[in-house]
Amino acid sequence: MVKKRGEGLIFISIIFVILIVLILNGAQLGMFAYSKDITNTASREGARAYAVEHSEDLARNQIKEIVSKTLYVNEETFPGENVELSEITHEDQPFCKARVSYNVPVIAPDILKILNPKDPGWGRFKKVTSSAYFLKEYQPEEELDEE
């Protein structure tokens, strides 16, 4: 009869590694979904502010405030060029567009290398981007004359 000492320990070790990979991937997916939701909200509010108030500075500040209050922000995750504001025309009507990007930090960039050593990994960040469009509102003539 062959002894099978240590077989259970090897089995538990393999299951433990697979379980850790699944838990980390689930947490990462949650971070992506939450970041996408926040960039959706920020782009919508930024486009709305730009369409109503006609001020890029106000729209940028609105976007930066929403992102900085809800997500981890530094120069790598949310640099200044991650906010784009523009005016576009669709069917002869002016729209204000806001596009917001956020670099989501990856929990374990090299976790896939456990399963496949030749895998390049995910890198340190993954970008999520959202855009929103609002119909540009016109200012009444009196307000235009005062400016």
Image: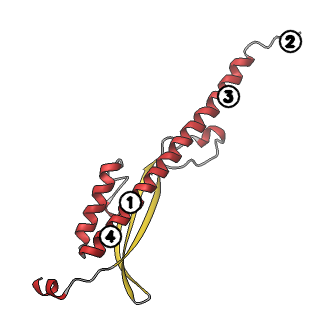
Secondary structure beneath label 3: helix
Q: Write down the quadrant of residue 99 in the picture.
A: bottom left
**Comparing labels 4 and 2, the label whose residue is closer to the camera:** 4
Callout 4: helix, strand or loop?
Answer: helix
Task: Provide the residue designation for mark 3.
Answer: 14
Q: What is the distance, in whole Å, between disc 2 and disc 3 at their CAs? A: 22 Å
Q: Which mark is residue 2?
A: 2
Kindly identify the amino acid type of the residue bearing the numbered disc 2.
Answer: Val
> What residue would you read off at disc 4?
48
**Which quadrant of the rendered structure holds the C terminus?**
bottom left
| Badge 2: residue crowd in 10 Å (few <14, some 14–19, many ≥20) | few
Q: For marks 2 and 1, give the one nearer the viewer.
A: 1
Amino acid at pointer 1 = Thr
Q: Residues within 10 Å of mark 3 (few under 14, many from 20)?
A: few
Judged by depth in the image, the label closer to the viewer, 3 or 1, is: 1
Name of the residue lying farthest toward the right? 1
Q: Residue 87: x percent and y percent?
A: 35, 80
* Left/right of residue 121 with respect to residue 48 in the rendered view: right
